[in-house]
Image: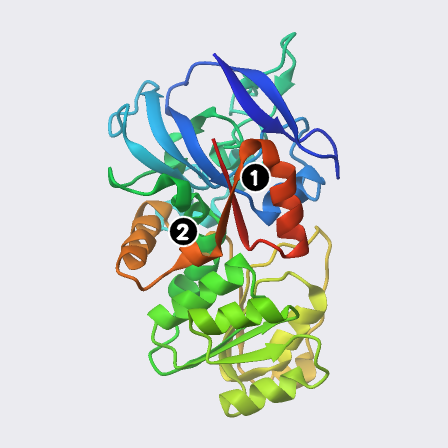
């Protein structure tokens, strides 16, 4: 069938709106008509070739929509089912089998290669030229896409699909890093560096976990304001020369838990410097391959701190996304306050607004 799509064609170039040919779903795939798709920083950095997904490509990895049809072997989904789309995994390696699919040994092949395992793509241009598909198993910047079954999470029939797509990556990443990895106990303190969509999701998750001192660090005053609205008890200007001292004072000697959502090397160093004894920290922010930061190992050796590198909140999407939806519906996780919607035709404006901070979580609607 012919489908409308936004494709990335070259680093830094605007996404182009085109019509592509979509093939039939293969065994183990689900054809989904998209209602909406979140726009994530990862879409921009893959377009810009931080990671080598072949271009041109249909990106988009926070999709939500309705099942159109299923390929052979898919028996637990049917046309008309509402679904949210997340990352893909092989399901057969040791991390997958132990409940940690975000660390799939074949993560690159299933999420960034732009091809099916047989080397083919779901999309072609006029003339038969291939366009990379199956980005995060889904390539959801298309009106209809053929999606890997492991990327598909069924949701309730009354689920608000225009809102839920970001649960598949950005929101899941911040919330999961807190609830699945750091796991702060009630009454503890936590510091979140970066108050974008991922960081604010972490702030809301810290509230869910009953942390009682929640510190948000950012350089944009409006984001710090929203962090307080969402549950941060303190905010710190990330440009302040004394931010480590401020954090140590607020937390009574150093952070018990901390999260860097920025991927910026100096911020990572600040996070490690502000940790308390036996503190636990995590990094979720994406950096260009080869990015390095420093740690004062002479001082930090005495701290007993633990630092985790976290992908997708170390979540199992089939379990964690429904959990986040339940928390949202209970009024405990108001991530809708981060979302602003755009028509697909305005996808480049959505990316620009995300880049300059005017929008925390853009979502394009089909």
The mark found on residue 100 in the picture is: 2
**Image coords of residue 183 (percent x, y):** 39, 70
What x and y, as percent, mark residue 177?
46, 62
Give 54 or 118, whichever is nearer the viewer. 54
Tell me if I can see residue 182 in this picture. Answer: no
Question: Callout 2: 10 Å neighbours few (<14), some, many (20+)?
Answer: some
Residue at 43% in and 69% down: 230
Picture coordinates of residue 301 (x, y %)?
Answer: 61, 82
The residue under the point 51% across, 25% down is 117
Q: Quadrant of residue 154?
A: top left
Graded by Cα atoms within 10 Å as few (under 14), some (14 to 19) or many (20 or more), the crowding at tag 1 reads some
- Give residue 309's mark: none
Residue at the image point whose x is 50% and y is 70% from the top: 227
Circle 2 sits in a helix, a strand or a loop, which is it? Answer: loop
Helix, strand or loop status at disc 1: helix
> In the image, residue 340 lies at what x, y percent?
50, 49
Q: Nearer the viewer, residue 149 or 362?
A: 362
- Asked whether 84 or 224 is in front, the reply is 224
Reading the chain from its start, which is encountered first: label 2 or label 1? 2
Spatial CA span between label 2 and label 1: 15 Å
Side (left or right) of 50 relative to 223: right
Circles 2 and 1, Cβ within 8 Å, touching? The answer is no
Query: Is the image coloured rainbow, by chain, by secondary structure, or in one colour?
Result: rainbow
Label 1 sits on residue:
108
* Residue 89 position (above or below residue 71): below
Q: Which image quarter: residue 180?
A: bottom left
Residue 325, above or below 109:
below
Q: Would you say residue 192 is visible in this rendering? A: yes
Q: From this viewpoint, which residue is outermost toward the top?
A: 127
| Image: 177 above or below 51 | below
């Amino acid at each position: 069938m012919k489908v409308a799509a936004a494709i990335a064609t070259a680093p830094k170039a605007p996404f182009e709106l085109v019509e592509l040919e979509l093939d039939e779903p293969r065994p183990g795939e689900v054809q989904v008509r998209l209602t909406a798709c979140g726009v994530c920083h990862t879409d921009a950095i893959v377009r810009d070739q931080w990671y080598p997904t072949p271009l041109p490509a249909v990106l988009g990895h926070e999709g939500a929509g309705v099942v159109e049809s299923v390929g052979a072997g898919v028996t637990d989904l049917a046309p008309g089912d509402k679904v949210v789309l997340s990352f893909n995994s092989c399901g057969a390696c040791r991390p997958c089998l132990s409940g940690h699919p975000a660390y799939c040994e074949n993560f690159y092949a299933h999420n960034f290669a732009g091809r099916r395992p047989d080397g083919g793509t779901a999309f072609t241009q006029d003339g038969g030229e291939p366009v990379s598909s199956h980005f995060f198993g889904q390539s959801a910047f298309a009106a209809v896409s053929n999606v890997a079954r492991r990327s598909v999470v069924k949701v309730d029939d009354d689920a608000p699909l225009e809102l839920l797509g970001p649960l598949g990556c950005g929101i899941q990443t911040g919330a999961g890093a807190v609830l699945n990895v750091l796991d702060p106990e009630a009454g503890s303190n936590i510091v979140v560096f970066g108050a974008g969509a991922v960081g604010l999701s972490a702030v809301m998750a810290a509230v869910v976990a009953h942390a009682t001192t929640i510190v948000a660090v950012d350089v944009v005053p409006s984001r710090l304001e929203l962090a307080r609205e969402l549950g941060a008890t303190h905010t710190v200007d990330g440009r302040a020369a004394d931010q480590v001292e401020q954090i140590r004072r607020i937390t009574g000697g150093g952070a018990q838990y901390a999260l860097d959502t920025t991927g910026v090397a100096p911020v990572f160093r600040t996070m490690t410097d502000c940790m308390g004894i036996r503190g636990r920290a995590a990094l979720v922010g994406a950096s260009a391959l080869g990015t390095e930061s420093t740690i004062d190992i002479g001082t930090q050796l005495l701290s007993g701190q633990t630092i985790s590198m976290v992908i997708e909140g170390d979540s199992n999407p089939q379990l964690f996304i429904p959990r986040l939806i339940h928390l949202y519906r209970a009024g405990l996780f108001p991530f809708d306050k981060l979302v602003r919607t755009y028509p697909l035709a305005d996808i480049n404006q959505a990316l620009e607004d995300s880049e300059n901070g005017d929008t925390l979580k853009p979502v394009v609607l089909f």
